Image (spheres, helix red, strand yellow):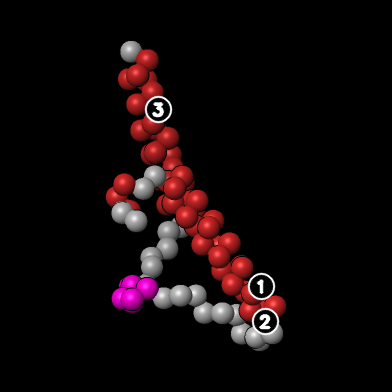
Amino acid sequence: MNSINVSAKQLRRAAEIKDKIEALETELSNILGNSQPAAPAKPAAASPKKRTISAAGRAKIAAAARARWARVRAEKKK
């Protein structure tokens, strides 16, 4: 997935899907009687540690995105 061409909505959906997969893996592990949750499949190459963003940072990004879309919609109306 090319992160440059991914919208915020798509990123949120991807995160939701990932969370569901992790929950299902844990449930499967419990059903199969393993005491440890199943380790998620790792990509072929180890990825560097992910960075996290604060709630304030996410809010700023969301506000900027809303402002950009507002400008786009305003241009369409003209």
Which circle's residue, 2 or 1, is located before the other in the chain?
Answer: 1
Residue at image point 37% right, 15% down: 77
**Residue assigned mark 2:** 32
Vertical relation: 4 (above or below) 65: below
Residue stretch rendered in magenta on the structure? 43-48
Where residue 70 is drawn, which disc sits there? 3
> Considering the numbered disc 3 on the image, is that residue within a helix, a strand or a loop?
helix
Q: Position of residue 18 (x, y in %)?
A: 51, 62
Residue at image point 31% right, 47% down: 5
Q: Distance between the Cα atoms at labels 1 and 3?
A: 43 Å
Q: Is residue 67 magenta?
A: no
Residue 72 quadrant: top left
Residue at image point 59% right, 72% down: 25
Residue 45 quadrant: bottom left
Q: Residues within 10 Å of mark 3 (few under 14, many from 20)?
A: few
Tell me which amino acid carries mark 1.
Glu
Where residue 27 is drawn, which disc sits there? 1
Which circle's residue, 2 or 3, is located before the other in the chain?
Answer: 2
Which is more toward the observer, 24 or 76?
24
